Image (spheres, rainbow, N blue to C red):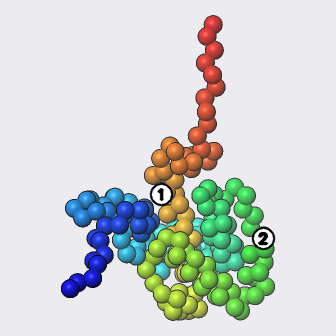
């Protein structure tokens, strides 16, 4: 005698970034992620964005705080209110010998946010051995992914442009 079987499809069962699983035979949503995603830029792929590479080499504290600002201001993720000399930048600068720890923690947040492949140990190793390359990769990743998200956002998402949908004024008949 067999016990009750678990159904293949559970209505309302939430899984994945886009809601519940599909019934057998249904085609998945094109944006549905299955598994981990890869980084869009390599760790040593700095020269694809020379200004960011230069900031990462000569002012890594500013680059760390800029990426942190982008992460804090999602869904807008813009640099309108960003100031180069801020708490995160000063903290990173004052604690320079252990600033790789800030990079390590930020990288973990980025991996979790965008469902990227990697482990805590790989994050720790990259942040410790090459802080600058890690900061450049993280900044490019967050910037590009948020730009892409804004480009692909629909009219009801609230992220169209910088202000979102604006209701038109009433028509005046004359």
Label 2 SS? loop
Q: Which mark is residue 148?
A: 1
Front one among 72 and 93: 72
| Left or right: 158, with 9 as reference point | right
Q: Residue at x 31, y 75 (%)?
A: 6
**Quadrant placement of the N terminus:** bottom left
Q: Where in the figure is residue 121, as x and y percent of width and height?
A: 51, 92
Dot placed on the residue nearer the N-terminal end, 1 or 2: 2
Q: In this view of the protein, can residue 58 be seen by the observer?
A: no
Residue 33 visible, this angle: yes
The answer to which quarter of the image holds residue 109 is: bottom right
Q: Nearer the viewer, residue 141 or 156?
A: 156
The quadrant in which the C terminus is found is top right
Residue 75 lies, in percent from the top left, at: 59, 58
Disc 1: CA contacts within 10 A as few (<14), some (14-19) or many (>=20): few
**Image quadrant assignment for residue 62:** bottom right
According to the picture, the residue beneath numbered tag 2 turns out to be: 86
């Amino acid at each position: 005698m067999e016990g009750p079987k678990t159904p293949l499809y559970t209505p309302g069962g939430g899984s994945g970034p886009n809601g519940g699983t599909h019934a057998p035979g249904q085609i998945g949503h094109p944006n549905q992620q299955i598994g981990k995603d890869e980084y869009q830029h390599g760790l040593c792929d700095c020269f694809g964005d020379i200004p960011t590479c230069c900031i990462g080499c000569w002012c890594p504290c500013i680059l760390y705080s800029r990426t942190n600002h982008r992460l804090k201001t999602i869904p807008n993720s813009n640099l309108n209110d960003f100031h180069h000399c801020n708490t995160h930048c000063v903290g990173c600068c004052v604690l320079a010998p252990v600033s790789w720890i800030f990079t390590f923690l930020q990288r973990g947040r980025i991996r979790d946010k965008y469902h990227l492949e990697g482990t805590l140990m790989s994050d720790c190793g990259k942040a410790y051995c090459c802080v600058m390359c890690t900061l450049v990769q993280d900044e490019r990743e967050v910037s590009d992914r948020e730009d892409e998200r804004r480009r692909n956002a629909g009219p009801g998402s609230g992220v169209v442009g910088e202000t979102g949908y604006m209701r038109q004024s009433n028509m005046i008949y004359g």
